[in-house]
């Protein structure tokens, strides 16, 4: 979802409205025909005419003042320190920062609620839920080139004899000196999931890294648009939170390989994913030895019945249960968290 505010809302001035109303009111004193004016001049002197005009002006001023009191700006949010509705400069930071939408955007709690309710109706009209996806060990695995083992050296020298699946899913990123391996089935997963869900990427990696990964996953920019949340977009340093996702918690699922990075209230939306460890550097991450990585064994997960293929079926079942038309076509009050009780640790149990 993208949030856009019309520039005409910023720096709008009630003085323009006042001027228009005043012109209308004053013009109404001249609505009579020339013949009527001539008769009127014989009846009223200039003092009476001026008195009438002054009374009209006083009436308009009173109406404008009343209108302005009713329309006092509630400052729903700011962009670079200015209210995006009335243009007033705000001395204090308000609300929650949504840097991934716009670098200087902050929204109040009430505005977040309004946007979530608006987009919830739009989601339901399309029969879509929201899916928040982790990157590392969920959709892909990356490693620093300097961390490759001797047995992984072949990955740097791919030839025509290298398996097609590996050539198409392994990327050397010279700009950040990394190798990235996309998880088997990931492109099919994203394509089919996008038909049922509006999707976000949410990673604790840096923004430059996140955008590089999204470019590999979604080169035509059809799945995520601007919905990419990185480390610098997180309001909490050590945790991810749905506070910066503009979707009602009742209609969002999280797919992540790590439970501890999510706060207590958000874990109700979480489906734990089997971790994808392709490179040998995972041994350092897991602090364990004595086994070889998929890359060292020159193996990979199955496309047909691997982790992503299985979790896609789970997501489809949840979606089907939520939008079950036997329950009626009014989806108000339904809560996706009630639909996947027992699925949360489906892979770990």
Image: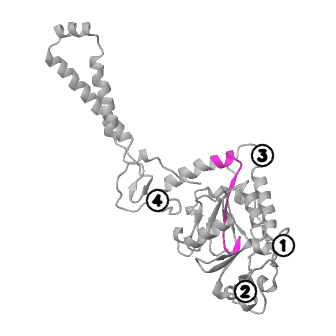
On screen, 16 above or below 83? above
Q: Residue at x 64, y 70 (%)?
A: 213
Q: Residue at x 56, y 54 (%)?
A: 2
Per the image, the residue denoted by label 1 is 302
Q: Quadrant of residue 104?
A: bottom left
| Earlier residue among tags 4 and 2 | 4
| Earlier residue among tags 4 and 1 | 4
Per the image, the residue denoted by label 3 is 327
Residue 87: where, in percent of width, then height? Answer: 37, 50
Per the image, the residue denoted by label 4 is 106
**Quadrant of the frame with the N terminus:** bottom right
**Are the residues at dot 3 and dot 4 in contact (C-beta closer than 8 Å)?**
no
Q: Can you name the residue that lies furthest to the front here?
A: 160
Frontmost residue, 255 versus 226: 226
Q: CA distance from mark 3 to mark 4?
A: 38 Å
Q: Which residues are magenta?
A: 122-140
| Earlier residue among tags 3 and 4 | 4
Q: Is residue 346 visible?
A: no
Q: CA distance from mark 2 to mark 3?
A: 49 Å
13 relative position to 278: left or right: left
**Are the residues at dot 4 and dot 2 in contact (C-beta closer than 8 Å)?**
no
Q: Is residue 292 visible?
A: yes
On screen, 284 above or below 168? below
Mark 3 lies on a secondary structure that is: helix
Per the image, the residue denoted by label 2 is 280
Disc nearest the viewer among 3 and 4: 4
Q: CA distance from mark 1 to mark 3?
A: 37 Å
48 relative position to 293: left or right: left
């Amino acid at each position: 979802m993208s949030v856009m505010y019309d520039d005409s809302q910023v720096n709008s001035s009630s003085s323009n409205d006042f001027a228009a109303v005043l012109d209308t009111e004053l013009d109404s004193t001249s609505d009579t025909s020339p013949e009527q004016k001539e008769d009127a001049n014989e009846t009223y002197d200039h003092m009476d005419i001026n008195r009438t005009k002054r009374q009209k002006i006083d009436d308009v001023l009173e109406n404008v003042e009343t209108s302005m009191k009713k329309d006092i700006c509630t400052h729903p949010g700011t962009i670079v320190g200015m209210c995006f509705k009335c243009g007033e400069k705000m001395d204090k930071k308000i609300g929650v920062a949504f840097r991934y939408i716009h670098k200087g955007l902050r929204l109040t709690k009430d505005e977040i609620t309004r946007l979530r309710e608006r987009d919830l109706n739009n989601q339901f009209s399309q029969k879509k839920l929201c899916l928040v996806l982790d990157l590392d060990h969920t959709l892909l695995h990356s490693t620093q080139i300097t961390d490759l083992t001797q047995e992984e050296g072949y990955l740097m020298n791919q030839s025509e004899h290298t398996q097609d699946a590996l050539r198409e899913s392994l990327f050397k990123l010279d700009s950040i000196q990394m190798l990235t391996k996309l998880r088997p089935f990931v492109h099919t997963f994203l394509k089919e999931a996008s038909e049922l869900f509006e999707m976000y990427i949410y990673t604790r990696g840096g923004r430059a890294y996140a955008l590089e990964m999204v470019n590999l996953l979604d080169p035509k920019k059809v799945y995520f648009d601007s919905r990419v949340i990185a480390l610098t977009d997180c309001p909490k340093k050590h945790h991810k939170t749905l506070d910066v996702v503009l979707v009602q918690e009742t209609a969002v699922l999280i797919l992540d390989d790590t439970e501890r990075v999510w706060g207590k209230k958000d874990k109700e939306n979480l489906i734990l994913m089997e971790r994808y460890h392709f490179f040998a550097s995972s041994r350092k991450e897991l602090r364990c030895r004595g086994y070889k990585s998929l890359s060292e064994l020159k193996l990979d997960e199955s496309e047909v019945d691997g982790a992503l293929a299985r979790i896609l079926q789970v997501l489809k079942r949840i979606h089907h249960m939520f939008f079950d038309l036997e329950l009626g076509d009014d989806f108000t009050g339904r809560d996706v968290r009630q639909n996947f009780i027992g699925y949360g640790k489906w892979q770990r149990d």
